[in-house]
Image (cartoon, rainbow, N blue to C red):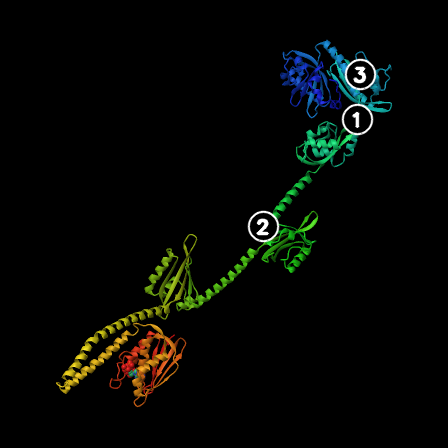
Amino acid sequence: MEKWPTTPDLASVIPDSVLSSNRLSHIPEIELVFDTDLEKIIDFNLQAPDFFSISREKLLSQTFLDLSPKKVHGQESASLIQIHISDALQGGNPSFSWMLQDSASATIRCNLRMFRFPPYSRQLIKIIITDLTDQRQFETDTVINEERLTLALLATESACFDWQPLIGKAVWDERMHELFDLDPDSEVDRGEHFFQSIHPDDRGRVQQNSTENTDPSNQARTFKEEYRISLNGKMRHILMNGLLFRNEKGEVERGIGTCQDISERKQAEEKLRFQAALLENVSDAVFSTNNEFRITTWNQAAEELYGWRTDEVIGKVLQDLVKPTYPDKSREQVLSEFRKQGSWKGEIITQNKAKEKLHIYASAQVLRDEAGTPIGGIAIHTNITERKQTEIALRDSEEKFSKAFQHNANLMALADFESMTILDVNTAYCKRIGYAREELLNIPGKLGFEGVDPNVRQHIMQVIKTEGRIIDFEALILNKLGEKIHIILFIEPLKIHGRNLHICTCVDITDRKLAEEKFLETQKELINITERYQLSIQSSQVGIWDWDMLTNKFVWDDTMYKLYGLEKEEVEITYETWSSLTHPDDLAEAEAGLKDVLSGKDEIQSEVRIIWPDTSIRNIRTKVILQRDDQGNPIRMIGTNWDITKEKEIEQAKIRAGKLEQKNKELEQFAYLASHDLKEPLRTVISFSSLLKRRYEKALDEDANTYINFIHQAANRMNQLVKGLLDYSRIGRNKQLIPIECANLIQLVLNDLNAQIVETEAQFDITKLPLIQGYGTELRVLFQNMISNAIKFRKPDFPPKIQISAKRKKEHWEFCISDNGIGIDATYLAKIFVIFQRLHTIDEYEGTGIGLAHCQKIVDLHDGKIWVESQLGEGSSFYFTIPD
Ligand code: ADP
């Protein structure tokens, strides 16, 4: 050990390499390095294992207390040693008597000296042990110590004194004399001069401490005093350290010590304190530290910021208190910057006494003495926690805003209405409006895009100007493709970085609008349908009835009353009313229908007869539906009634017509069979009567011949009748509709009737006749019968004049064949169309009475009508129609 460090400052200059064992090995004293955090001995010199008769390894695992007895000087060694360690850690360099024990538990009386030991980032103590059991050794040690002392004093520029109070002797070295401004040769009592030199303000304290230290009851082995001396008007700060040696009685025999002029350090500290005092009233925390970062000053604001009082922090290492962390930087980097630049500024995160996190803006400056040597640092800590939190909150809220803006489903834009510029738009905006961001953003004067009607835009600008915002403004805009977009516009003012901007939100309601339009259309359509329905109900004479089954109340609409032949005011409708109006024969069936509905059938339809007040009977058709409540109970029955009397009549007529047709068919069949079967025996009668006449005419008398003639004529006539009947039954058998040119057909008929026409000199007036669809053979028969009758029934001596014409009517052609013949008595106009009906005898006009029956049947076959207009003696006009 080359130096005897007496102050922390001095200790700090000892290089770390001092720890190396070879440097310790030549020191006769036992040295241990003790880590107070680990509570372990971490290093020692070569003498140490021998001293404790212990292996190196074992010694390394020992705590200091392992090497000491439980009690020393009658006190708990653990608490006693702790006091000395604390003293040493604070730079006190304590020296005290102690007891140690070796591995065999043998007690060794020692003197211990403790020093704070580098590196100072750790709590290391060097313990120097002087074995006092051997006086000789002690003396040797003393000599060595004195040598070392001299060396140390030289190195530290300390003055040294040796004071023996019992004999009143004080020996000062040269430096001591210099320090206390005393001639070394002076006879002045050094003790007296010493006390006299002390500043009056400190003297009392120093004297008192000295008295206490030298008191035999006091076991103190060291002393330390800081005071000022005042000599020749000059004041100096002195740090005095010393060892006390006591005799058996405890009296101080000797005090050896050093005095060090610490005025410069004090001045530096004063300067720091002064500078700190200047900043005492500032709102920022200001504090200074020494070179070890131990706090030397701590202003009011620092107390408030961190919560520790000044007296709690002085001497403490700042780092240990506020535990700073540096965003993006390590502590080593910061310290290196600080040392290199002599200052450092930046944000740090610390904690206060309550361990609350603080954001601090720190500004630290290295302080130097006049020679430029760093003496510590001064730091200003500004609390930016609130600002930081606001910043974070702002950043969060900006992020939230940005997300809400960009990902909003509505169309959003940030606009500057002053410069008419769009500053930002969201994705939905670009997508819907169809423009790229570049086409919209940062183009002054071009607010928005072409698709906004200039009048709408002007209106918006006006409202913004007067009211500052727009709420719920519906507008129609066009996107880039010219598609219509219905929007609801909201514009809200927004201040961003001092700029008055507006955030515009467009809610796209196009779909809603279309749906609305569709809805309106549907509604209109519904109204139309309802109107049509009501009209159709009214026009169709459908009556509606409504039976509330819970109240048994019947409601009939006006039509219902009409359908039942009742006056609304005259009758009150109940179930009984209805049943009394229903035909008794149909009531059971009608009620069964209602029961069917009640028992689950959704809808029934039935037909009933009802009896009107005038006893006439009407047919009513009814449809019923049932309404049920949530539990399925029937609550309401609604029905419609309409009159089907006519329908029924038509139905009946159809049935009758069907039956008639069937009968006709059967009759035709019969006529055919009868006429067909009659032909054979008739032919026999005719041929045998002819034979009889031919062969026996001469053999028979006149009467017999007359009879045979009668038989022959009657048989022939019957043959004609049968033939006519057969033809009649054959009409329409092989019918086939074909186009018929009536003029041609008439010509054929006239050709057939040529002999009669020539004979009677009949004249014809034929108008233009149409082309019709008809049955060819049948129509030829029709015209032939008509024309031959017109010739046949002529007035005697009057050549027949016959007109044939056709008139176009709405849905048919009306043909007319009129003559100037004998005419027909009005009584028989209808009769003549009946088969075998004749108005004349054979002698007057030959014929069978079948011709017009044929005509009737042929016209029926064409779904036409046939009739005759005539006056007896005035000619006749036969009409018939042939539909298109
Ligand atoms: P037929 O000619 O064989 O007597 P029709 O059935 O053709 O049988 O006529 C029935 C009756 O209608 C005739 O007997 C006749 O009395 C009357 N009649 C028919 N056509 C005429 C006519 N053009 N003028 C007057 N009477 C007519």
Q: State which quadrant residue 67 falls in.
A: top right
Quick check: 409 above or below 110? below
Provide the residue designation for mark 2: 409
Residue 350 showing in the rendered view: no
Tell me the number on the disc at residue 161. 3
Which residue is situated farthest in the bottom direction here?
A: 797
Provide the residue designation for mark 1: 266
Return the disc, 3 or 1, that comes first in the chain's sequence. Answer: 3
The residue depicted at 30 percent of the width and 79 percent of the height is 852
Quadrant containing the N terminus is top right
Residue 13 showing in the rendered view: yes
**Label 2 residue SS:** loop
Amino acid carrying mark 2 in the image: Ala
Say which of 754 and 634 sits in front.
Answer: 754
**Label 1 residue SS:** helix
> How far apart are labels 2 and 1 at the CA level?
71 Å
Q: Find out whether the residues at labels 2 and 1 contact each other: C-beta distance under 8 Å.
A: no
Which residue is situated farthest in the left direction here?
A: 699
Of the residues tagged 2 and 1, which is closer to the observer? 2
The quarter of the rendering in which ligand 1 is drawn is bottom left
